[in-house]
Image: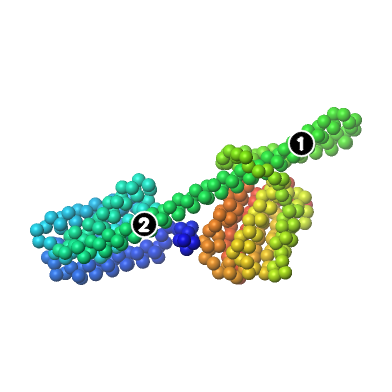
Amino acid sequence: MKVLTGWVQGHRPWSTTAKVTVAAVLLGLTALDAVLLEHLPSARAGLVVGCAVIVCVCAVPVERVSLTVRATVAAAVSWTVTLILITDDDPVPVVGVGEIAGLLLLLASVLWRGSTRAALVLGPALAVACVAVPARDADPHEWTLAFSLVTGVVAAFSLLLRAQSEQRVRDLDALRSAERRALARELHDVVAHHVTGIVVQTKGARFARLDARAADAVLESIGREAEEALSAMRRLVTVMRRAEPASGASRAPASGIREVREMAAAFASDDRAVEVAIEPGLEARLPADVAAGIHRLTREALTNIRKHAADATRVCIALSSAPGALELSVTDNGRNGAALPERARGGGFGIEGMKERAAAMGGRLEAGPLPSGGWQVRAHLPLTDDVGAARTS
């Protein structure tokens, strides 16, 4: 089941090499049919081989022609030829291997990747077409049971893959919603912090006798707090527009860069060194909500290392800034994790959750193996101009 889940998670559109390979195999089977049926009258042989060619062409994935159209044409042609041959008064051996292979491939594609309506309508039509092909033969009994069993196995396996894919989509949706709600709660806490600071300073200024310089300092501080609150509120609104209402979710204080250092120290062991390289002064300049996001991304990256690269002896956490940008990278030298296929190491929900969090913060996240060995998670996040510019001042 784990192998099956990994296959579903790593599913990608057909590559050109895969299309050429499928087309070559189907063409070879059709040519074999032509050779085996050369003893038949030319009309019947041409009908069977022509049907096989059409079905096999429809079975090859083509982006410009939808799967529903290709499956409909193949089923209609196969059924038409079957009806013509079974009504013939002089039945002959006319079972086509190429046509069966094409119908089975279309059946699997429709049941696995087709729409619900296509699976309900075209699935049975293609399945019965596969089973009906032996009815054209002079002695269909020896073929009918075999084709029925093969069709049943293909249909069951395809439906299982479809169920796995749909469950993964539901799990990813739930994960994304949870990440958005968590980020929204953290941003809310940050906004409340800034607004509280504004209120305290405003009330204090009302009762204190301040000279012009002190009043200017207080007003500057209030303005700075207001700008921070406004920036965090904008990010909050962006996330809340995409999030579902939270119900009874637990609340915890937002963590930051200090907690990143503590987490790195706890992750280190006698067999694993953890280096933390954070740009000097960056911790004090980062908005609290951005720091909380960095903490969450780092935590998920370390969890990914623990799960997939337990043999790693060195882990490096780097955080740096540039004008308008912030970059976080978590790198390990694990050989076992780097040797895994990319979908096996990055196909779980941890990477997806990190990508969702980075996207909600207005940035992006990349994860993959390094040419020199090991694995790297790299996040690029936006920063306000004043935070990024402070690096060069």
Give the residue pinned by disc 1.
196
User: How many discs appear?
Assistant: 2
Does the rendering let one see residue 83?
A: yes
Q: Amino acid at mark 2?
A: Ala
| Residue name at image x 75 percent, y 49 percent | 285
- Residue 104 placement (x, y as % from top left): 31, 59
Classify 10 Å Cα crowding around label 2: few (below 14), some (14-19), many (20 and above): some
- Residue 120 placement (x, y as % from top left): 33, 47
Residue at the left extreme, as displayed: 89
| Residue name at image x 63 percent, y 67 percent | 310
Tag 1's secondary structure?
helix
Q: Quadrant of residue 371?
A: bottom right
| Of the two numbered discs 1 and 2 in the rendering, the one whose residue sits closer to the viewer | 2
Q: Amino acid at mark 1?
A: Thr
Give the residue pinned by disc 2.
156
From the viewer's perspective, is residue 191 above or below residue 153?
Answer: above
Left or right: residue 166 versus residue 325 is left
Residue placed most toward the observer, 386 or 166: 166
Left or right: residue 276 versus residue 128 is right
From the viewer's perspective, is residue 98 above or below residue 209?
Answer: below
**Colour mapping used in the image:** rainbow
Residue placed most toward the observer, 244 or 381: 244
Does the rendering let one see residue 187?
A: no
Left or right: residue 104 versus residue 179 is left
Q: Quadrant of residue 27?
A: bottom left
| Residue name at image x 76 percent, y 36 percent | 196
| Residue name at image x 85 percent, y 29 percent | 206
Classify 10 Å Cα crowding around label 1: few (below 14), some (14-19), many (20 and above): few
Residue placed most toward the observer, 389 or 363: 363
- Residue 365 placement (x, y as % from top left): 60, 55
